[in-house]
């Protein structure tokens, strides 16, 4: 598929936007504080056997142990699982807030010599990394790749040479404005954190994740009733909503239980058409999504696999739509300050931030801060200010 691949990277964070023309097809945020571990294979240690749940809890080196249903272990191994034993497991589902990852010990097509690599190692230990979205996106042969990190640019060039493929344009971005902002993607990203999603004909979606599920309401809003009357209006809005919902599930990486309140179909035939349309559209989704059913009132229940952390968890504080995540803000501030420092080299830029953003600068984003300092040629001063909700960039003449 022809398209553009935009990659903005700092140590500790990588943001990838895949576009066709000006349409955002997919968006990834990868951060070290919320690592992508789906598909990783570990040598773990059983910390607890819960007979009531018929499951084992397995330490794999994360904050919380993984959850291994005993049905996900080969029958010959179940009797050998006991507290303290080592076991090779694969991550089936990303961890969520308050929950560890889901695991399996049934490994299909494992890497060669996996058991050999586990010999002599003390659990927990990572044996094999899982899926990385970048190779999959590169395999789709984008027309253009634009990257703002020198080391990653060199890596991509080496990869393309190794498979004898040169994209039409593989360029290192050296602009004085953050890459995704310059390419018009930042507004799209901001929209992925909004509750309201407009539909083409005047209807809208209201998307609200909470801790236990994601609720999506389909609202006719400003949709004008056509010549066909109410029944046609309902079908038009619901049809538009299906495509928009599938796109938002992908872009926002929503997962778990998803409840969609469609406009109430007029009759059984309309419900069948809606359900068929929803299932057909979801076949294009790379994540496994199951439609549980559609009630007479138009209430649909879906379950979608958690392949990566949802955008709202990475960029907001929990499910709050008004408070940004301080770690995300720290990386955003560094990207903006880097461009400011390169744009006006005669001046020095410093940051005024909230206490939480300042703590992130000294923690998860510390290596990124050092890199930006080396690029702009001076240390970045970070001033905590209780009056600043997020961050401000202040420029002043160099002394």
Image (tube, rainbow, N blue to C red):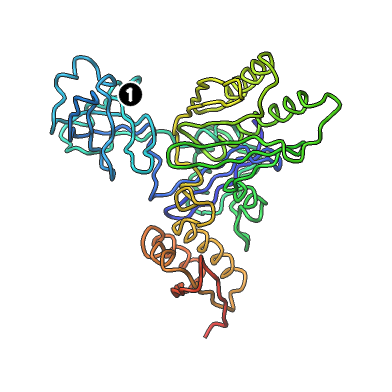
Q: Secondary structure at mark 1?
A: loop
Q: Report the residue at 23% width, 38% height from top.
A: 59
- In-front residue for pair 22/229: 229
Q: Residue furthest right?
A: 227
Quarter that holds the N terminus: top right
Quarter of the image for residue 160 reads top right
- In-front residue for pair 125/277: 277
Location of residue 1 with respect to 266 vertically, above or below? below
Left or right of residue 68: residue 157:
right
Question: Picture coordinates of residue 358 (x, y %)?
Answer: 42, 67
Q: Residue furthest bottom?
A: 399
Check disc 1: other Cα within 10 Å, few if <14, some if 14-19, many if 20+. few
- In-front residue for pair 18/153: 18
Question: Picture coordinates of residue 138 (x, y %)?
Answer: 55, 35
**Disc 1: which residue:** 110
- In-front residue for pair 152/352: 352
Question: Picture coordinates of residue 72 (x, y %)?
Answer: 29, 21
Q: Report the residue at 47% width, 56% height from top.
A: 325
Figure label count: 1
Left or right of residue 318: residue 75:
left
Question: Picture coordinates of residue 351 (x, y %)?
Answer: 50, 72
Left or right of residue 307: residue 259:
right
Location of residue 383 with respect to 302 vertically, above or below? below
Q: Report the residue at 36% width, 35% height from top.
A: 129
């Amino acid at each position: 598929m022809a398209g553009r691949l935009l990659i903005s990277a700092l140590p500790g964070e990588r943001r990838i936007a895949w576009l066709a023309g000006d349409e955002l097809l997919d968006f990834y945020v990868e951060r070290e504080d919320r690592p992508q571990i789906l598909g990783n294979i570990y040598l773990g240690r059983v910390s607890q056997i819960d007979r009531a749940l018929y499951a084992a809890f397995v330490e794999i080196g994360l904050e919380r142990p993984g959850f291994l249903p005993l049905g996900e272990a080969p029958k010959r191994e179940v009797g050998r699982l006991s507290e303290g034993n080592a076991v090779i497991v694969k991550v089936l589902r990303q961890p969520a807030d308050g929950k560890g990852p889901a695991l399996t010990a049934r490994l299909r097509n494992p890497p060669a010599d996996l058991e050999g690599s586990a010999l002599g190692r003390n659990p927990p230990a990572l044996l094999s990394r899982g899926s990385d979205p970048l190779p999959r996106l590169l395999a789709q042969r984008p027309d253009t790749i634009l990257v703002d990190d020198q080391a990653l640019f060199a890596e991509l060039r080496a990869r393309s040479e190794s498979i004898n493929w040169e994209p039409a344009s593989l360029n290192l971005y050296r602009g004085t404005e953050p890459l995704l902002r310059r390419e018009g993607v930042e507004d799209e990203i901001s929209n992925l954190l909004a509750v309201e999603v407009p539909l083409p004909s005047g209807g809208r979606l209201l998307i609200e994740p909470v801790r236990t599920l994601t609720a999506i309401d389909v609202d006719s809003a400003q949709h004008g009733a056509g010549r066909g009357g109410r029944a046609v209006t309902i079908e038009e809005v619901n049809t538009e909503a299906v495509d928009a919902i599938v796109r938002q599930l992908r872009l926002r990486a929503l997962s778990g239980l998803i409840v969609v309140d469609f406009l109430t179909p007029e009759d059984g035939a309309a419900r069948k058409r809606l359900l068929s349309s929803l299932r057909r559209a979801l076949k294009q989704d790379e994540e496994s999504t199951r439609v549980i059913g559609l009630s007479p009132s138009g209430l649909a229940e879906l379950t979608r696999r958690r392949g990566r952390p949802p955008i709202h968890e990475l960029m907001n504080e929990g499910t709050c739509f008004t408070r940004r995540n301080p770690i995300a803000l720290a990386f955003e501030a560094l990207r903006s300050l880097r461009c400011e420092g390169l744009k006006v080299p005669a001046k020095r830029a410093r940051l005024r931030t909230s206490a939480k953003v300042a703590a992130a600068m000294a923690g998860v984003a510390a290596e990124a801060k050092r890199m930006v300092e080396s690029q702009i040629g001076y240390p970045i001063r970070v001033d905590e200010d209780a009056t600043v909700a997020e961050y401000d960039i202040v420029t002043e003449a160099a002394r």
